[in-house]
Amino acid sequence: MMHGMTHLQIHADLGQRACIDTTLLPWVAAPSPGVHRRMVERDGGEVARATSIVRYDPGSTFPTHTHELGEELLVLEGEFADETGRYGAGTFIKNPPGSAHAPRSEPGCVLFVKLRHLEPDDAGRVVVDSRRGAWRPGLVPGLTVLPVYAFGARHTAFFRWAPGTWFQRHRHHGGEEIYVVDGVFEDEHGHYPAGTWLRSPQLSEHTPFSREGCTILVKTGHLLTP
């Protein structure tokens, strides 16, 4: 068991830009057998504010646990399940602060997971299947949007970029975090293939585009520095 994990700080300064190809990170065993994680961003011990890629081997289970400050997860591959149901690839779930569950995966799965990034009073549970959702036109031609949830200044949504889509230069007032689900996302700072995690701090600016098309999960407004 890893309950004695020392306090880890991995890309923990929310005021700093970070860009990580998560596919290159090592898999680290989680406290539960058959569960592994790639630590993308972390501030804490076994209980931590964290962003991770989590892999469940087929038939793996995780003991019942409570998310004091909530959990957000996106099923990237396979099928994830808990007491509320079974969820395939492309499904986003927000489990609110104080919620508890016992996750499992019969066929195995890979997840993008964020822990302790929610406000304590953000009480709603959210489940959005990006493969069946009601996508709507975005602000520029070629961009479509699937809103996931909003709470105060915080917003989470999927954005789908058709090949050759360009967006105007803009500033992130509460910061922006992106996970590239498929394709290749780009801006003037770089080229971000599927599996890339990007954090752009408060008041950063960029001009994003996608030459070959992509789908990204975007979270904004949660990186306000005190």
Image (tube, rainbow, N blue to C red):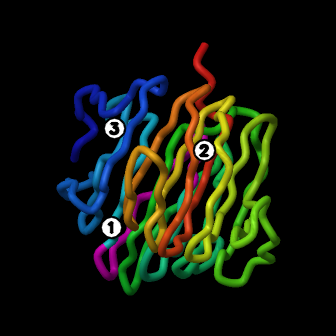
Q: Residue at x 38, y 69 (%)?
A: 61
Q: Nearer the viewer, residue 191 or 70?
A: 191
Give the left or right position of residue 82, taking residue 63 as reference. Answer: right
Q: Secondary structure at mark 2?
A: loop
Q: Find residue 55 and name its label.
A: 1
Answer with mark 3 or mark 2, whichever residue precedes in sequence: 3
Q: Give the magenta range.
A: 57-72
- Which residue lies under the disc numbered 3? 46
Give the left or right position of residue 73, taking residue 23 as reference. Answer: right
Residue 119 screen position, x and y as percent? 69, 33
Examine the rendered structure and indicate whether residue 63 appears above or below residue 9: below
Asked if the residues shown at circle 2 and circle 1 are in contact, with their CB atoms under 8 angstroms apart, the answer is no
Callout 2: 10 Å neighbours few (<14), some, many (20+)?
many
Q: Secondary structure at mark 1?
A: strand
Answer with mark 3 or mark 1, whichever residue precedes in sequence: 3
Question: In 3D space, how far apart are the residues under numbered discs 3 and 1 (Cα atoms)?
Answer: 17 Å
Q: Residue at x 27, y 62 (%)?
A: 23
Q: Residue at x 49, y 70 (%)?
A: 211
Q: Residue at x 62, y 60 (%)?
A: 166
Q: Find residue 39 and name its label.
A: none
Residue 51 screen position, x and y as percent? 43, 46
Question: In 3D space, how far apart are the residues under numbered discs 3 and 2 (Cα atoms)?
Answer: 15 Å
- Which residue lies under the disc numbered 2? 70
Question: In 3D space, how far apart are the residues under numbered discs 2 and 1 (Cα atoms)?
Answer: 19 Å
